[in-house]
Image (cartoon, helix red, strand yellow):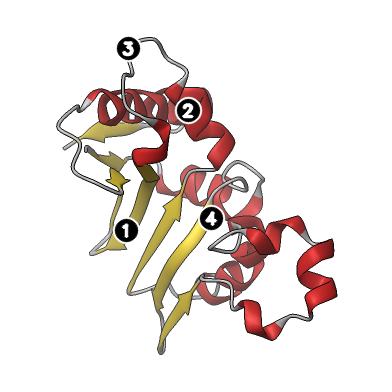
Amino acid sequence: MIALEITNKKQFMNKLLNSEAFDTFSLEEASITTFNEFIIYGRIQKEFYTKEELEETPALANEFSLWKELRPLCFSLIRGSHTPVRFKLVLHAGRRFLEKLLADPLITIDPAAVKSLHLIIKYEAGKLTCITGTAFHTFVPDKSLDNIWDSALKKSLSSMNIDFEQV
């Protein structure tokens, strides 16, 4: 787990809210405080959909909605004439990305043990921070996946020309 302070907030927010850069992530939760506090739980409510809709829409088989589906709503809450008081987004890396990381020969973790790779994006008191994390179904003493996930995020941010400092 690492924390990265984003030094170019405007560029990062543009990538997050106005591009497809994070669209393969799922949104577990968003908390956005502007003139009110808005909380979005990204868990898909399967009982809302008909059996046919569930069968015809592969994305509905996921536990959480994709960021690309909720990005416009979050953007509408964040944009405005005032900077938000704070916000926090809890994202999960896509399964394909996780499988790509697990293919690394340095990883000896059983893929079935991995629940998710988290990316927590927090803005408060003028600071924008990205925090990585991993979740497992059972205790895993091996930290190799954590290290590779941390490196992959730093590489990804660098490739998007987003400046950051590890804190």
The N terminus lies in which quarter of the figure?
Answer: top left
Q: Looking at the image, is mark 2 or mark 4 nearer the viewer? A: 4
Residue 5 lies left or right of residue 39; in this view the side is left
Dot 4 or dot 3: first in sequence order is 4
The residue positioned farthest toward the bottom in the image shown: 36
Residue 123 location, x and y as percent?
A: 32, 60
Task: Please tell me whether mark 3 sits on a helix, a strand or a loop.
Answer: loop
Q: Measuring 44% from the left and 33% from the top, which residue is drawn there?
A: 162
Q: Measuring 41% from the left and 81% from the top, which residue is drawn there?
A: 34
Separation of marks 4 and 3 at Cα, in angstroms: 26 Å
Q: Which residue is mark 1?
A: 122
Q: Which residue is mark 3?
A: 106
Residue type at mark 1 is: Lys
Q: Which residue is mark 4?
A: 26
Residue 26 location, x and y as percent?
A: 53, 55
Residue type at mark 3 is: Leu
Q: Measuring 58% from the left and 67% from the top, which residue is drawn there?
A: 75
Separation of marks 1 and 3 at Cα, in angstroms: 30 Å
Residue type at mark 4 is: Ser
Separation of marks 2 and 4 at Cα, in angstroms: 17 Å
Task: Please tell me whether mark 4 sits on a helix, a strand or a loop.
Answer: strand
Q: In the image shown, does 70 or 28 lie closer to the viewer?
A: 28
Dot 2 or dot 4: first in sequence order is 4
Q: Quadrant of residue 139?
A: top left
Dot 1 or dot 3: first in sequence order is 3
Q: Measuring 61% from the left and 67% from the top, which residue is drawn there?
A: 70
Separation of marks 1 and 4 at Cα, in angstroms: 16 Å
